[in-house]
Structures are given as structure tokens and as C-alpha cells.
Amino acid sequence: MSKVLVVDDEKLIVKGIKFSLEQDGMEIECAYDGEEALNKVKAADFDIVLLDVMLPKLDGFEVCKAIREFSNVPIIMLTAKDSDMDKILGLEYGADDYITKPFNILEVKARIRAMLRRSRRVSADSNSNQIVKGELKLDIDARRVMVKDEEVNLTAKEFDLLELLVNNPNKVYSREQLLSIVWGYEYPGDVRTVDVHVRRLREKIEENPKEPKYVNTKWGVGYYFKAQQ
């Protein structure tokens, strides 16, 4: 049974999401402010956190940033309608996805199901559960990444993005293709989502993010993982 933490200070919204997700067999816990949400994530394991931006005590950005200091649990942020800054900030602080308010509950459920499928998937393209590329090592089952034998904490989407690129070296993916494959549905967002994730990924795995050795750009086309010579 998937365990989801729903965080919003609007109790009617929380009640509606909780009821709908429970109909799909999920276990739901709720929090109504940032401090309560952070404490719950520290105290228990969740498969997904659905996190509103506007919260009492600690806002969603602060909560997301704090969670990323100790956990890579997938985070979907709820942002104000048409607020591009909220979307970009959420991704910058480590969110994996975002949904704009007001939302359709069917969209929320679809995003959560897609995220759960991706976060639990074991790559069918790899003959081994570990992939080693130079100083970079991916443990597919454990969803862990090591660089020079030091573990790197990636978000769920950062790991999915890296896994796809590593399994298909030198294949160039457009931003639109990455949105469709990594996010797992017809994503209503824009290509900046991919750009932010690639930049954050480079900052974590590249010795010099401005001159990447692993995740490279094909100008005017997209991104690819450079096969080691």
C-alpha cells in the first residue's frame, strides 16, 4: 500500500484529496502547516509528499528544502495558478513535480500514480542492477548514486532522468521527449522543468558543471549522456 502525506492548510482540500486517494487503496496522512509536515516526514517513511506552497509556520519551499537535507522522497508541489516563479522555485528547492491550483483531482491521482510507477521501476534495459560509468555508479534497485565512492542525494526525478540517459549513451533526447518519458504522461508543464533538473543534476554529479563530463547538451536539440572513451 502506497503511503502519501498530503500537506495543505485548507482542510476541505485535504479532506477531498484524502477521500479520493483512499478510494485507490492508498494510505493517507495529513498535515496542515509546514512544521507539522516536516516532523511527519522525519518520523515516518512516505512514498510521496503532496506539498502546498502557501503554508503557516514554514512555507512549502522551506519544507521542501529541509526535506531534501535528509530524504529523497518524491515531492509534488501545489502552486498558485500561472505562477511560473513558484514552479521554478519548487524545482530549485528539490521538488520533483508541480500541479497548479485549482486542479482536477483526476490529474492529481494520475500524477501520483505516474510518480509511484517511476520511483519503483527497476530498469528493464540493464542486465545488471548496478551501472558503472567512469567514476559514476548507479545502483538501480536501491536508487542510489555514487560519485568517486561518495553517495549523492538525488531526487526521484533526477534519478529517473540520469538512469534514462545512462542507459542510452550518446542518444540525444529533446526536452519534450524527456518530459514525456521521465514524467510518464503528457506533461502540461514546459521545458524549463527539464532544464532545471539537468542543471541540478550536473551540480551534484559533475566535477565542473559548466564543463560536464557526463550529461551533455546538444545545442538546439536536447541532452545526452556521453559514453566514456
Image: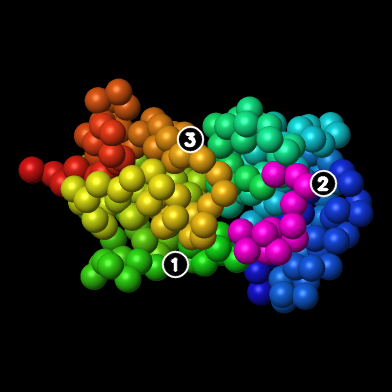
Secondary element at tag 1? loop
Question: Which stretch did the figure color magenta?
Answer: 100-111
The 10 Å Cα crowd at callout 1, few under 14, some 14 to 19, many 20 or more, is few
Secondary element at tag 2? loop
- Horizontal side of residue 147 vs 197, given as left or right: left
Q: Residue at x 48, y 35 (%)?
A: 192
Mark found first going from the N terminus, 3 or 2? 2
- Horizontal side of residue 82 vs 125, given as left or right: right
| Residue at far right of view | 12
Q: Does the magenta stretch include residue 97?
A: no
Using the rendered view, name the quadrant where residue 225 is placed. Answer: top left
Mark found first going from the N terminus, 3 or 1? 1
Percent coordinates x, y for residue 2 in the rendering: 65, 69
Percent coordinates x, y for residue 139 in the rendering: 35, 58
Q: Name the residue under label 1.
A: 121
Kind of residue at disc 2: Asp
Kind of residue at disc 3: Arg
Q: Is residue 101 magenta?
A: yes
Q: Mark 3 points at which residue?
A: 192
- Identify the image quadrant of the C terminus: top left
Q: Which of 154 and 97 is in front in this view?
A: 97
Question: Any mark on residue 8, and which?
Answer: 2
Q: Which residue is drawn at 26% across and 57% down?
A: 167
Q: Which residue is drawn at 24% across and 55% down?
A: 168
Disc 3 to disc 1: CB gap under 8 Å: no
State the scheme by which the image is colored.
rainbow
Mark found first going from the N terminus, 2 or 1? 2
Percent coordinates x, y for residue 86 in the rendering: 66, 32
Kind of residue at disc 1: Arg
Secondary element at tag 3? helix
